[in-house]
Image: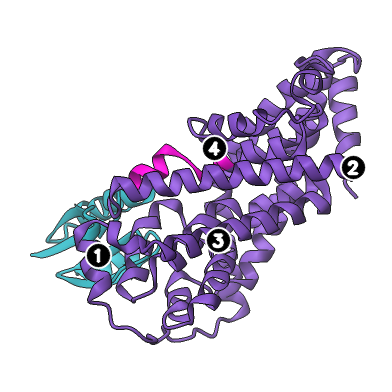
């Protein structure tokens, strides 16, 4: 079971990113939970400046844009 | 070069829609078609071209450039990068904290964040196409100056004391000195093209409504506000019109894309240049949504101070420009 965190202060793109990852997880039957992290202090502690960013099991995988379905599958498979 | 858009508007408004150029509605529709077609074409071309050039620039690299720079250089670099670095305003907070944790003084960070909404490629395209190079230059100089001086003032009063506790601590614990730049990416032409395409799609989908709204408002002003109404009532540059315009800009919220077409109409209707710029810059730079965001990292007193500082700056600039316009 992997934990995916989408970092971002609630902008449209961040919300869309979280929804998209959730969608990919369901479609591919991946074992992961998706949560959103909006707390600026928490985002700061990941050292992320460009949101949306994606953290998988506490590791920053992606920053600054919406990831593609292929990327998401690669992280979570 | 821009005449083609006038012909297009002539043809659509007067031939296809059969409107009379002498009527209010005819003038408004003509204005709307000419400006919106011109802006859309220019935006698509310019966003793509600029994105090709700046494909390898991002906030992470800007941070590495700014960290450990002497202060006097930092403010101009901060404002300069604010003008050319792409980032969505929803990233302001992570960017602010990222700069702060790198030990970059709050003033330099704010130079970056203040300049960013005022100056960007979309604003420059609009200014240049609607108002010509002189206004573009004036706007650029003022935008950069406000960013730089704003940062300088914030540092001279030690703004970092008024950050939220966690942000202040992050700043105090920051290692001073330079930090490593992320690896420089050598981008191929194809990668640059892909980036520019994505950027074009991203920016365009974000600004097109603003363009229509701004041009629509500009067209309504152009067509329906009687000739002489503005110049008779506000055109003498009465001293109180500038601070009033600045204050009016606070509840109005628009980005530069929406406000510049309105600027064009106001100027054409005879509103003095200083008053017009005060209204527009205050609308873009001083907005409630942006300040609510910044509240996450700043205490109210610092936010209030920044707001007052900007309002005073825009008022002084407005007065100065109006006075100069009288002399010249």
**Which residue position holds label 4?**
B254
**Which residue position holds label 2?**
B4
Chain coloured cyan? A
Both on one chain, marks 4 and 1?
Answer: yes
- Left or right of residue B245: residue B95: left
Q: Nearer the viewer, mark 2 or mark 1?
A: 1
Compared to residue B232, the image places residue B215 above or below, namely below
Q: Residue at x 72, y 45 (%)?
A: B320
| Subunit of label 1 | B
Which residue lies most toward the left here? A1
Q: Nearer the viewer, mark 4 or mark 2?
A: 4
- Circles 3 and 4, Cβ within 8 Å, touching? The answer is no
Foreground residue, B178 or B43?
B178
Residue bounds of the magenta highlight: B282-294
| CA gap, disc 3 and disc 2 | 41 Å
Q: Secondary structure at mark 1?
A: helix
**Which residue position holds label 3?**
B149
The disc, 3 or 4, on the residue closer to the chain's N-terminal end is: 3
Measured as percent of width and height from the top left, residue B239 is found at: 69, 31
| Subunit of label 4 | B
């Amino acid at each position: 079971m992997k934990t995916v965190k989408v970092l971002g202060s609630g902008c449209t793109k961040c919300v869309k990113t979280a929804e998209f990852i959730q969608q990919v997880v369901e479609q591919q039957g991946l074992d992961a939970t998706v949560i959103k992290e909006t707390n600026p202090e928490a985002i700061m502690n990941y050292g992320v400046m460009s949101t949306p960013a994606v953290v998988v099991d506490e590791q920053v995988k992606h920053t600054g844009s919406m990831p593609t379905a292929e990327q998401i599958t690669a992280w979570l498979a | 070069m821009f005449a083609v858009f006038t012909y297009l508007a002539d043809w659509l408004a007067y031939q296809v829609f059969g409107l009379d150029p002498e009527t209010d509605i005819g003038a408004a529709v003509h204005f709307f078609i000419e400006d919106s077609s011109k802006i859309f074409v220019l935006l698509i071309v310019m966003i793509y071209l600029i994105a090709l050039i700046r494909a390898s620039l991002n906030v992470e690299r800007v941070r590495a450039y700014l960290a450990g720079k002497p202060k006097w250089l930092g403010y101009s670099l901060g404002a300069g990068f604010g003008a050319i670095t792409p980032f969505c305003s929803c990233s302001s907070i992570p960017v602010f904290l990222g700069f702060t944790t790198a030990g970059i003084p709050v003033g330099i960070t704010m130079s970056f964040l203040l300049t960013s909404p005022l100056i960007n490629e979309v604003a420059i395209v609009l200014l240049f196409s609607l108002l010509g190079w002189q206004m573009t230059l004036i706007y650029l100089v003022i935008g950069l100056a406000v960013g730089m001086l704003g940062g300088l003032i914030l540092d001279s009063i030690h703004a970092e004391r008024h950050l939220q506790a966690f942000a202040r601590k992050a700043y105090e614990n920051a290692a001073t000195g330079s930090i490593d730049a992320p690896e420089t990416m050598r981008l191929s032409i194809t990668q640059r093209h892909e980036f520019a395409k994505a950027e074009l799609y991203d920016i365009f989908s974000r600004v097109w409504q603003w363009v229509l709204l701004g041009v629509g408002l500009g067209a309504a002003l152009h067509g329906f506000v009687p000739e002489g109404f503005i110049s008779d009532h506000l055109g003498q540059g009465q001293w109180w019109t500038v601070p009033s315009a600045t204050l009016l800009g606070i509840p109005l919220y628009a980005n530069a894309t929406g406000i510049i077409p309105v600027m064009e109409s106001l100027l054409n209707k005879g509103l003095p240049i200083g008053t017009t710029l005060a209204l527009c810059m205050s609308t873009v730079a001083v907005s409630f949504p942006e300040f609510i965001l910044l509240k996450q990292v700043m205490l109210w007193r610092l936010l209030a101070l920044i707001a007052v500082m900007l309002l005073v700056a825009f008022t002084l600039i407005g007065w100065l420009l109006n006075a100069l316009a009288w002399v010249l």
